[in-house]
């Protein structure tokens, strides 16, 4: 059994992940900003923790993280203003990485997206630009840091139920990745040390998730 913190606990992927991890016997704390969401979190089997990651310092986040085995960053501004996108998807993400290192919680999994990179090529006048910039900066900080990280990069998301199957890398040709499948991938990654130091880009596909994750090398 692991002690796992999910940052951005009320997102659809995070809620599915909390239910999966709790069902497997892990002890899960889900960070949320809005106390009205506590009942939703409790229903997944996780423990709700009201914490505004935009307002908390790395030191304060470190206190929350201390004593855990893994951090999952699944928070996001959700396509809000560019300022808030940078605040959440870049700045708060980087603070959680620094906080995890300070707290001695070295296993860190971040939810990114397929194609995220410093040379993403998104034009500045595109609405997606701030998100692409923010995720690229956060992912780059993670890669250069001391954490035992995995970056999970699904393509365009769908609300389809989990098929339990994906295709990874160049084999991924489907148009969407189910949010529930993404949650299953993260759950598998947490227990798979072979994924440390890797970026896993995928879509829904034909390979069992456990087999696809086990094949990462």
Image (cartoon, rainbow, N blue to C red):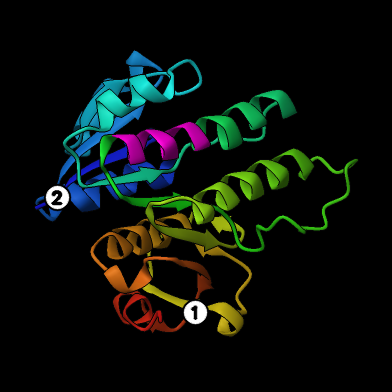
Please provide the residue range marked out in magenta. Answer: 94-102
The location of residue 31, given as percent across then percent down, is 33, 28
Up-down: is 144 above or below 71? Answer: below
Closer to the camera in the image, 23 or 52: 52
The kind of secondary structure element at disc 1 is strand
Up-down: is 179 above or below 62? Answer: below
Foreground disc of the pair 2, 1: 2
First in sequence: mark 2 or mark 1?
2
Taking the spot 32% from the left edge, 74% from the top edge, the residue there is 194
What numbered label is drawn on residue 167?
1
Whether residue 77 appears in this view of the structure is no
The kind of secondary structure element at disc 2 is loop
The location of residue 70, given as percent across then percent down, is 26, 47
The location of residue 4, given as percent across then percent down, is 23, 43
Q: Residues within 10 Å of mark 1 (few under 14, many from 20)?
A: many
**Main secondary structure of the magenta stretch:** helix
The location of residue 74, given as percent across then percent down, is 44, 42
What numbered label is drawn on residue 201?
none
Residue hosting label 2: 2
Q: CA distance from mark 2 to mark 1?
A: 27 Å
Drawn side of residue 103 relative to residue 2, left or right: right
């Amino acid at each position: 059994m692991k002690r796992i913190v999910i940052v951005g606990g009320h997102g659809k992927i995070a809620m599915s992940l909390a239910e999966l991890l709790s069902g497997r016997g892990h002890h899960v704390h889900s960070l949320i900003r809005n106390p009205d969401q506590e009942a939703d979190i409790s229903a997944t089997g996780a423990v709700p923790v009201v914490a505004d990651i935009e307002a908390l310092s790395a030191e304060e986040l470190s206190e929350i993280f201390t004593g855990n085995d893994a951090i999952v960053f699944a928070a996001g501004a959700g396509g809000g203003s560019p300022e808030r996108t940078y605040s959440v998807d870049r700045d708060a993400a980087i603070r959680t990485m620094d906080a995890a290192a300070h707290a001695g919680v070295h296993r860190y999994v971040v939810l990114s997206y397929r194609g995220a990179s410093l040379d993403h090529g998104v034009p500045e006048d595109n609405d997606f630009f701030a998100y692409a910039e923010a995720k690229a900066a956060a992912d780059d900080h993670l890669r250069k840091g001391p954490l035992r990280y995995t970056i999970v990069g699904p393509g365009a998301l769908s609300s389809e139920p989990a098929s339990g199957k994906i295709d990874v890398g160049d084999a991924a040709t489907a148009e969407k990745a189910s949010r529930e499948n993404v949650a299953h991938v993260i759950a598998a990654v947490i227990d798979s040390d072979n994924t440390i130091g890797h970026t896993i880009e995928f879509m829904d596909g034909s390979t069992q998730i456990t087999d696809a994750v086990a094949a990462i090398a």
